[in-house]
Amino acid sequence: MRHFSYFCLFNIMSQFREILLKYWGYDTFRYPQEEIIKSVSEGKDTLGLMPTGGGKSITFQVFSMANSGVCLVITGSR
């Protein structure tokens, strides 16, 4: 499990906001997107429950774009 200092986490969240602005044109995340991304970036198992149209996809897309490797998303959508 990764452990981050406040400064390191601040820099990571800034990188996520830069990606959000560059690709989606938003300068802030909607509630609870930022909390979900922060939890995942801290290495925690995370369950993000949001309504249809709530912006779930941004939470894993932004995180994936900031990291190398594969992102596995399990969704209940049919």
Image (cartoon, helix red, strand yellow):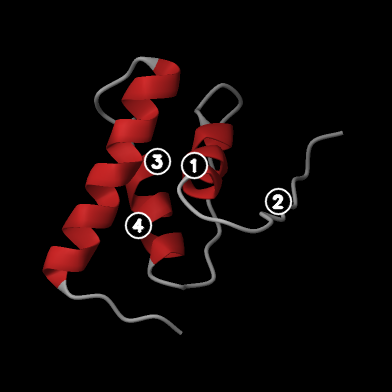
In this view, the residue in front, 55 or 8, is: 8
Circle 4 packing at 10 Å, graded few (<14), some (14-19), many (20+), is: some
Q: Secondary structure at mark 4?
A: helix
- What amino acid type is highlighted by mark number 2? Val
* Marks 3 and 1 close (CB-CB < 8 Å): yes
Circle 1 packing at 10 Å, graded few (<14), some (14-19), many (20+), is: many
Residue 32 visible in this rendered orientation of the protein:
no
- What amino acid type is highlighted by mark number 1? Thr
Q: Could you tell me which residue is drawn at 54 percent across and 71 percent down?
A: 45
Q: Is residue 4 above or below residue 33?
A: below
- Determine which residue is flagged by label 3: 33
List the single residue furthest toward the top.
25
> How many discs mark residues in the rendered view?
4
- Determine which residue is flagged by label 1: 59
- Determine which residue is flagged by label 4: 38
Q: Could you tell me which residue is drawn at 47 percent across and 73 percent down?
A: 44
- Distance from disc 3 to disc 1, alpha carbons, whole Å, reads 6 Å
List the single residue furthest toward the front.
68
- Distance from disc 4 to disc 3, alpha carbons, whole Å, reads 9 Å
In this view, the residue in front, 14 or 53, is: 14
Q: Could you tell me which residue is drawn at 72 percent across and 55 percent down?
A: 72
- Distance from disc 2 to disc 3, alpha carbons, whole Å, reads 15 Å
Q: Residue 47 sits in which quadrant?
A: bottom right
Q: Earlier in the sequence, mark 2 or mark 3?
A: 3
Q: Earlier in the sequence, mark 4 or mark 3?
A: 3
* Marks 1 and 2 close (CB-CB < 8 Å): no
- What amino acid type is highlighted by mark number 3? Gln
